[in-house]
Image (cartoon, helix red, strand yellow):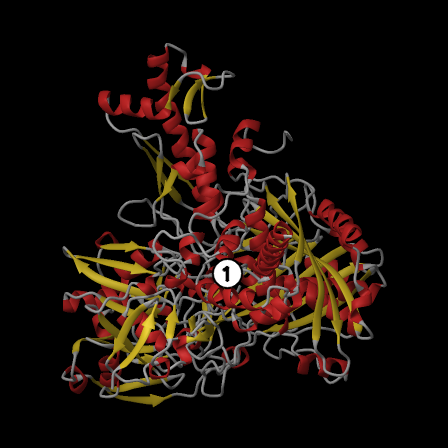
Amino acid sequence: MTVTFQLNGERCRFHEDPMTPLLDVLRREKFLTGAKAVCREGFCGACTVHVDGEPMMSCLKPVGLVSGCSVTTIEGLSSGDQALHPLQAAFEAADVVQCGMCFPGMVMSLSAFVRDNPEATRPQIKTAMAGNICRCTGYERIIDAVADYLAVQKAGSQAKEAAHV
Amino acid sequence: MSETLSGTTHEVSATVMDLPRRDARDKLRGRTRYTVDRVRPDMLHAVLLRSGVPAGRIVRLDVEAARHASGVRAIATGQDAPGLYGIGIADHPLLAIDTIRYHGEPIVAIAAETETEARAALALVELEIEPLAPVLTMGEALAKDARLVHDGWRDYEVLTEGGAREGNIAWEARTTRGDVDAAFARPDVKIVETTIRVGRQSHVPFEPRTAIGSWENGRAHIETSTQVPWTVRNVTGRVLQLPPGRVRVTVPPVGGGFGLKFDATIEPITALLARITGRTVVIENTRQEEMATCLCRENAEILIRSAVTADGEIAGREAVVLMDCGAYGGEQIFLSTMTAHTLGGNYRVGAMRLVSRAVYTNTPPNGAFRACNGVYNTFALERHTDEICQALGLDPLAFRKKNVLGDGDLGATGQVFEGNVLRPMLERMDALRAVTGTVEDKADGRLYGRATTVGTWFVFVGPSAATINMNADGSATLVTSGVEIGSGTMMQSLPQIVAGQLGLTPDQVVVREADTDSAGLDVGVGGGRTTVSIGAASIGAAEELRNKLFGFASELLQTRPEDLELVGGRVAIKGRPGSGIAVSAVVQHAQSVSGPVTGTGSFTGKPVPFMSGCAFGHMIEALEIPVFVVHEAEVAVDPDTGHVEVLAYRVVQDVGRALNRRAIMGQIQGGVVQGLGYALHEAVTIAPDGRIREDGFETYRVPLAGDVVPVVADLYEGAPSSGPLGTKGAGEVPILGVAAAIGCAVANATGKLVRELPLTPPRVLSLLKGRERAPEFPHIAASFEANTLA
């Protein structure tokens, strides 16, 4: 059985076992090593990708189940020399990265979260991060950076609205 | 600028900044290629057959059937790598030879075209093990008639002289200063005794240990996720019985280390299999293997006893510390040294004797974990201190202010401490608390506790080398054996230091990834040493470069070298910014007249005086650069469930000089949270069959975002340090005082004696119900002398 899906905007075919975890297809077949295989059991979130825009742990996703779907990996979030996603830029500016292994997954989870929850409070951000484990940073500075990012976005959209009045 | 800090005002202002990390963008985009991301389809995959029993003799091992399995290209057993390695004592084979000493010990390595084929071949290995009764605890190991984990311990090569050893005692380090018996016999003292037991902590780096070995022009080349490229080189040489110079180690970005990657157990296997096959071979630990064979922070058992006068003078102190090294000595042999400086630290003590024993058991070997033996010894010492205060009716904070080590005070080995550091740091904690306020109201009906604790750690100085090549565009390339493990030293402090010395911007400093073929000896990234040791070597290299550049510029500018300075990318005339000539022009001139401009520097620790006859079996007798911390925690304990919530956390940390405050704050937040995991819920336990039970994320509970609080920190600058520009290591020590602060706060909240970690809800509930008994150690003798081999 061949599985066909969109991968970072291009058609992708996979001809082997459809039960193969999407993570292994990405890393071993497509050499997209941004998604990290850390626990492979759905606890750590380091392999998070977007499937039709929703964050999913690719270690738990048999590739057969993404047939016909659109998969975006960290490499597809800002490819080539495109600008960073503004949340990535916020993380870079706030110096929150340490070893970095959890960040591709962290960015994929939180980029969807801030898109869907522009009004999120600090406790809501914390709750949203429950599925992304980080062993280095102790989280708080990441949470600060997300909260600051949302505040800036909100101020920006208010300014835009004001300009339209 | 304070006179007590080293470095000129100009050097300091050119170096101190909140430089962001140059590797952050690629890491955020998933483009950084850690070792684990470098697996190519043309590589062979190696897997290990590991022991399923904790102790036994290999009766039969036949790999012929496996050798003929599909895809198999090479098989190695212990016979292929007969050399033993270790720290202090060479007791560790690469693959088990005849004897099995722990559950998970590698016995056979198989390289095949795919991992699936390699695993299938594992099943074809014919292995017969005659099981032996395992020695699983230190109590069992120290029993009179205990079976020896290493029958042949007497025959091992001794790599470092001085430690007493016998049977299951792999190493013993002992200190004695003053007449302890006399102190305990004084009529005016009260004797307080505390027993402490702690379990293991697993590092859980997100990148597991992974190595890629190839055989190139008659030499091994190992690309690996390590903190210690030179150790990997030397261990590989030892076990393969090659001159270490025939091993090259290169290190991509490392996805977390925390001390675990001081290990060198899998790298030599890849080299061995690469030599046999002529192919590149990768070994990547599965998460289960990674955790089941993790070189954890060791479990330990501590008895500490002090003789204290009514007004709180510590007349005498003695302690026995048992450290479980697991099946092989490893880091614990070195770490037995640290008891003198951690449990023997913090306070002024009249007379003191300490013994620290690394004990063999049939359990997975332990290793180094951030602030190693310091974390539990600080927990023990600070709990003991609070128990002293309770026994004597003294205020714990006032007791600490009165008794902390100050200028001219003696450490356990007779080292004389310099400067008053801990006391002013305690005062700074008072000031910090006054600013933040306390949050008892957040306890909301639960039991509230607060505690302030102190800690002593150090910078692991030791050899480092640096070369700086000046480039024709005015940039500089820094070549060292330093590794970026996530702490930021290679990305922030080193380019800041080199730029500050050469009048460049940090982005003009290229930092070379570690390659043992291109950079000189280095003892590794850990022990808070990188900024200090590689930083000092880099300053040495920059100094040589500066003199060379001034020499050339002096001719070009017709100015005396002593009137020149490097600033803003120019060799300028002192006091006249913008004057002189661009560095790039000087370098180009030099290249044409005498060749490229290069500077080299090297560094190692200097011997620090201690009292002769005080320290036996110590690899470090005195601390060249002590580092102090003050930690304060506020907790709420739920009396119904035993759950501990951390309400607030404050740190005052001795940093010497902060080169990048923002980066240090990141290390403090991360280190404290790792400590909270250790204090509250990270538990590694050993099953009756000797295996580590918690071998995945489901069973080993690391802190999640919802568990943590923002750590408020004050960086204490100006304490004496021989580090470059007055720096000290800042990344290792944040974890040091956490278990102590949390343990003391929980004791204060509950009114119960906290003597074991982690403080999981069941343990705390059991404390509250009065069911938790103080640990008893029948294998620790009542008399101190009976606990030593002396």
Quarter of the image that includes the N terminus of chain B: top right
In the rendered image, the vertical position of residue B655 relative to residue B542, given as above or below: below
Can residue B55 be seen? yes
**Horizontal placement of B15 versus B93: left or right?**
right
Q: Which of A133 and A143 is in front in this view?
A: A143
Give amino acid for label 1: Leu
Check the residue under mark 1 and report the chain it is in: B
What residue would you read off at disc 1?
B335
* Other-residue count near label 1 (Cα within 10 Å), few / some / many at <14 / 14–19 / ≥20: many
Q: Position of residue B290 (x, y in %)?
A: 41, 73
**Residue drawn 28% across the image and 73% down it:** A12
In the rendered image, the vertical position of residue B23 relative to residue B93, given as above or below: above
**Horizontal placement of B277 versus A137: left or right?**
left
Q: Which of B674 and A105 is in front in this view?
A: A105
In the rendered image, the vertical position of residue B723 relative to residue B365, given as above or below: above
Marks counted in the figure total: 1
Mark 1: secondary structure? helix
Q: Position of residue B459 (x, y in %)?
A: 52, 49
Quarter of the image holding residue B436? Answer: bottom right
Can residue B785 be seen? no
Q: Residue furthest top?
A: B558
Q: Residue furthest front?
A: A165
Quarter of the image holding residue B274? Answer: bottom left
**Horizontal placement of B282 versus B403: left or right?**
left
Q: Nearer the viewer, residue A113 or B555?
A: A113
Q: Where is residue B714 in the image (x, y as percent from the top left)?
A: 67, 48
Quarter of the image holding residue B704? Answer: bottom right
